[in-house]
Each structure stands twice: as C-alpha cells, then as structure tokens.
Image: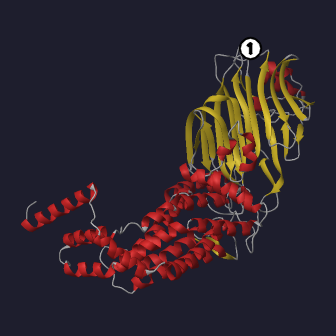
Amino acid sequence: MEEKKLDINSIIGFVLIFGILIFMFYQNQPTPEELEAQKAEQEKIEAAAKQEEQVEVTPTPVQQAQSVDLNDSTAVANYKSAVGAFGFTQATEGTTKLENEVLFLEVANKGGQIIEARVKNFVTYDSVPVYLVKDGNANFALNFSANDNRVLNTADLYFEPSLSKNGDNQVLSMKAKVADNRFLEYRYEMKPNDYLVDFTIRSQGLNGVINSTRPITLNWEMNGIRHNKSVQYENRYTRLTYNHEDGKISKLSESSDLDEETEEDIKWLSYRQHFFSSILASDNHFKTAELSSKNLVEEEGKDVMFTKAYSTKAPLELQGGELSQNMHWYYGPTDVKVLDDYKDLGLADSIPFGWGIFGWINRYIFTPFYGFLSSFLPFGIAIVVMTILVRLALSPVTYKSYLSQAKMKVLKPEITEINEKYKDNAMKKQQETMKLYNKAGVSPMSGCIPALMQLPIFYALFMFFPTSFALRQKPFLWAEDLSSYDTIFNLPFTIPFYGDHVSLFPILASVAIFFYMMMTTGQSMQMQQQPGMPNMKFIMYLSPIMMLFFFNNYASGLSLYYFISNLITIFIMLAIKNYILDEDKIHAQIQENKKKPKKENKFQRKMREMMEQAEEQKRTGKR
C-alpha cells in the first residue's frame, strides 16, 4: 500500500504540470456556452444574408460615403454641398503607393486612408501574399462637426495627394482643403527597410471650420484576414492588445463572442493576427478609447476568411483650435527581433510571451536561446538540441525526485507494519507514520516539489512554440510548419476536440508518456486499489489520451519538444535507478538519521498536539 503512495508522489508532479497545460488549452479556446452563443449569432447573420455555405464578413465603417460619380456634374455638386467648406478640394479618384524593401502600402484619395497593406517577403499557408489591409477589410476615419452644423466623416472626403522625399524617406501628404493654405492633412513618412510608418494628423487654419465644442473621434476598424492553415488555431493567438496607464499591457478576450472595454491613457493598440500585427501608436497617447473585439470564427473551415472584427473609438483634442496628433503605423510580423527595434514604443510587449515569470523566461531565456541555436542548426534540430539541454539542466531536480522515491521505497516495510498495527485507528496510524518520516528525515511531499519547480519551464515552453515567429513555415521531417500542426492523414470527418486530421508528433509524445508512466506506475497497478487513492491505471491511460487530443491541433514544434523531453526523461530515470542510486546506501543513511535526535519545529509540534487532542476526544467520546 505504501508503494502506491510512492508511485503517487512520482507522478503527482506530472499530473500538476499536465493540468496546467490543460487549463491553458481551455483558456485558449471558446467554452461550450461561447460556442453556442457564436453559433446562434452566426445563424442570425446567415439568415439575414441568405447564406448557407460560409460566413461572409464585410467591414462596417462608422460612416461610409456613397460612391461619387465624378463625371456627373450633379453628383459632384451634391458632394460639395454635403461636405461644405471641404468641397474646395479637387475631387479625383486614385491612389498613391508607398513601398520599401519590406512593406507595400496603397493610400486612397477618397478618405486619405490606407486601403492596402502588404507585408513583403512572406506568404500565407497557401502561398498567397500576406495582406493586413485589403478589399475593404479596414476603415480609418475621423468624425467631427463643422461650425455650419455639418457632421463630417473623413472617409467621405477627398484628399489631394503630394508625394515627396525627405532624405531617403518617402513622404506622402494627403490634404482635404478648405483653401490653398487651410486644410486637414494626413502625413505618411516611410523609411527604407522599415515596417514602421510615421503618421501625423494635423490641421492648418481650421479653427474657424471645426466646431471645438463637439468631440472629434478617431475610428479605426479592421477585420483580421486569415493567414494560417487552421483558422481556429490562428484565432487562439489573434487578439486586441494595448499599452495603457503608464506601461500596463492588457488584452481583450481571444475567445468570447464580443468583448468591449473603455480604457485611459493608451500608448498603442495592436490588432494582432497571430504572426502579423497592425499597430497604431500615438506619441501624444489617447486619453480614452472604446475598444471592442468580436469573434468571427464559428468553426473550422477553408471558406472562413476572417478571424476577428476589431474596433477602436478614441476622442482627439484640439490644441489652439487645431488638430496635431503624431502617430505611427506598424504593419509587419509579430517577431520579437523586429519589434525590439522599437524599444521607445515598447511594441515587443504586444507578443503573447505569457504572464509573470513564465513570460519572462519565455522572452529572455528561451526566445534568444532558440534564436542562437537556429542560427547555425536546422530549425527542427535546434528544438531537439534545446530540449536535450533543458532536460540536462533539470536533471538535478529529476534526481531529487527519484531520490525521494527511493527513500519512500526503503521505508515501505516499516510503513506496512504501521498500517497493519493501527489498521483500525486511522488517526494513530497517521501519527506514527509522520513520526517515522520525521525520524528518518524523509518528506512524503519531497517528490512533488521538484515537479512543481519545473512548472515555469513547462508553461514558458507551452507559450513559446505556438507564438515563436522563428518557427513559422519552417519544415522538419514530415511537418511542413513547426508553428502549426503536422498532418499525416486527413480524415473525411471531424472528431470533436480532435479535428479532421491525424498529427504524428502528438502520437509519438503520447506513446512516450505512456511508457514513462508504465515504468513509474507498473507495480502499483498490480496492487489492490485503496479507498480515496487515485487510480493509477486510469491516470496512466488518461494522460496519453489527453495529450493526443489536446495537442493534435497545436504547434508540431511543441509536440516534438514533449516527445523528445519524455524520451530523455525515461533515459535519465533509467540511468539514475540503475547506475546512480544505491538503495543499500540510502537505507543505511536513513537508519543513521533515525538514531539522531530530531527536534520538532513549531509546525510539527502543533500538528502532533492537534492530532493527540483529536485522538483523545475520540477515545473519550467528547466533542
């Protein structure tokens, strides 16, 4: 019976660790209630749009002007009447392109906004260029009131473009004019080989045009374009992140149907699309902003084109009756090596490294360490090497865990004797067992503590593999992309929680876990199950099955890590048991410890006194 306790201590750490991973899995996917709500909402959308095959998502601008036929003099006159003083601007259709080595932008005369943003040098899972803005999925505009009581939206206005150079930088000035020297300007400045574009909103001579008593609102809306093979997997790491209140990083929900917040003192807003981000940063900060994120993914499907609908509404303040807001657009990879170049803005904080010490380990240890290994090793081999080094670094912790197991095994005959002697007196049995542990210098919980110490490592790696840009589209063996799941067989149907495909790396990891647990729990399965004790056989079979299901849709790099890690753990365990630990020496040491007088600490004394009092009350029948 005590050997069962020994085996429980040997696996309780694993169960705790795996429990953390299961918890994180559920945190990164919708609950059944949320899925039901999403389904109901989607049915309404489909019924309204008379669609049966797919979700059709379109941008929803706050105020979108109807198309103006510039060849129709009546339409032009109506437009000039609608926009009032801004009708001075020469209304012409057209776009202006800004392009450097890494980024392509197209800015429209209508609205002065970016209508196409393409990240160069990258493609999606199906070899299509990576677009962050395209085909009307985004809208950026200002809403304000004029002194003649017109309510205007810059998406309605035509801007006059002017392209120039500032050194090596390209400068695009978009002006909505009320006179030659009075205008509202959007100014874009693109630097060579840079994902960050300086963006300024300013006005000149409009203090008599803009009504300063009414709010001016910046509206930025975007539907995230799908880039990955699995839209549900991509959606887990797609969310609105923002820096506010002097450096605090917060996020809207990645799984709820709709999440809304009103925040203050916002430095930047990131519409993250897993491995790519659209970020708007403000030097002046936004004093307040209304943020929302709506989940657009109901279920897995190749026809689903968008992940989330993001929206921001932020009031802007006039300075001396004029607008002046210095900002920056970032369209590029969610890559720490790139985002770290903008330390003054702190854009690297938008990457989901994890919370607390786990995120710190991920960002400052595993990310640079893997970057170093992958600089001279193939990406898959770098994972194997990193896994080996991590396990070797944790081998002292593993040794202490097995040492504790060995000590408990040595004490088994004495524990069995105590159990038999006091089999009808549970309180006395517990007292004598604790007394034996104290005299022998053995703690029954010492096998759990080493496993708990490994939790930060396991969690950090759990967050590292799905979000590491370095792994994106990097193949290894049969896996085409280490940042996504591997596929060896596509199923003609979908299994709930498992998916419509079979991944091999999770199978290998599950088999390795099964053999590890066979080695640690094999003997206890032969013994009669004791009341109140965990069923070792059940746990042994359940854990690999959970691994198989939960990791089938996760990054193959993560499953590769757990497979290699479990193999190494098995080898280390065999080496410790067969070549390092000597049970005779351990037994002799325990006997020496028992001879030495042991002084109780306050906690032990208090526990002993409480148990003695309970025993006395039980004996006398008092309460």
Whole-percent x, y for residue 460 in the image: 58, 57
| Residue nearest the observer in this picture, 21 or 221 | 21
Q: Quadrant of the C terminus?
A: bottom left
Q: Quadrant of the N terminus?
A: bottom left
| Residue nearest the observer in this picture, 282 or 622 | 622
Q: Is residue 210 left or right of residue 541?
A: right
Q: Which residue is mark 1?
A: 207
Q: Residue at x 74, y 49 (%)?
A: 337
Q: Within the image, what quadrant is residue 165 found in?
A: top right
Whole-percent x, y for residue 195 in the image: 80, 43
| Residue nearest the observer in this picture, 361 or 93 | 361
Q: Secondary structure at mark 1?
A: loop
Q: Is residue 245 left or right of residue 117?
A: left
Figure check: 165 above or below 567: above
Whole-percent x, y for residue 20 in the image: 50, 61
Q: Residue at x 43, y 78 (%)?
A: 538
Whole-percent x, y for residue 357 in the image: 55, 51
Q: Is residue 107 left or right of residue 328?
A: right
Q: Within the image, what quadrant is residue 206 found in?
A: top right
Answer whether residue 3 is visible to the viewer in this image.
yes
| Amino acid type assigned to the residue bearing label 1 in the image | Asn
Figure check: 480 above or below 39: below
